[in-house]
Image (cartoon, grey):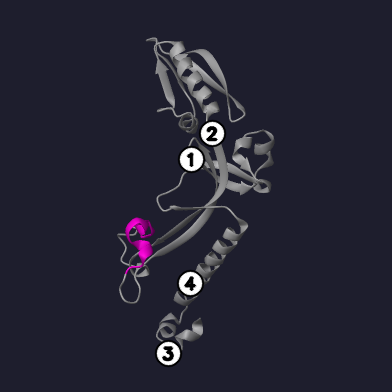
Amino acid sequence: MARVKVLEYTFENETIKVPVNVSVDGTFSCSIQFQMSQKLDLKDNKLSGTTLRDIEDVLNTAFYEYKQRTTKKRMVVSITFKATRGFTFNEKGEQHPAFIGDNSFYESHQWSNEYHDNISFGYRILLEESINGKRFYYSAKKREEVNEYLLSNRLIPESRQLDGWVGESSTSLNSSEKTLIPYSEKLIENLESIKRQLRNTAFFLGDLLSSDSKESLLISDNFKLLK
């Protein structure tokens, strides 16, 4: 493959260089970053054509249309909650509404091979970028927690910075992250409160089940005293 030209474009306030090569059979080709191809609304991050003009026309149009799009960004919190079996039913054996119908994604099938009741909870802070309604997500950190070298050398573009937060790395929502809420300090405070309660329960069980006297403790009439 011989290089015939290096195309240059401005993307997220950065200069992007795209080398175009030609094969021995006369096929022109180039490749760009996968996420860039998504934002440019290209079907593939690898392009090919019978002429150099074929490549240039596709990229020129894509970059031009990208600049015309409406881009919005906001900070969001993605919340994960999953439960199975006993945790989804009340004392009467009735399933809680959160695990029925449209909200059934709270009931995790990932633990279908296990015999026990399970529960899982967590959250993470993300920077959401919306380009004409198509959403992209970045794992976010406070600006002071990000390596200054990345910021001063513009390795993280300004388009991924908002209100003291930096979208450090690209990510995607997994199947259990169905709840997205706009970021607020009060939201994080309350979510941390939930985590503390679950953590205390985990520590209590950890201490209890690792105790040399766990059997006597678990069958004791004074078990309530362990709370």
| Of pointers 3 and 4, the one earlier in the residue sequence | 4
Helix, strand or loop at label 3? It is loop
Residue linked to disc 3: 221
Of callouts 2 and 4, the N-terminal one: 2
Tell me the amino acid under the disc marked 1.
Arg
Residue drawn at the location 36% of the way across and 65% of the way down:
97
Q: Which mark is residue 70?
A: 2
Is residue 106 in the magenta section? yes
**Is residue 185 shown left or right of residue 94?**
right
Residue behind mark 1: 135
Q: Are marks 2 and 3 in contact (CB under 8 Å)?
A: no
Would you name the residue on which mark 4 appears?
206
- Residue 116 percent across, percent down from the top left: 34, 67
Disc 2 to disc 4: CB gap under 8 Å: no
Q: Residue at x 39, y 11 (%)?
A: 50
Q: Secondary structure at mark 2?
A: loop
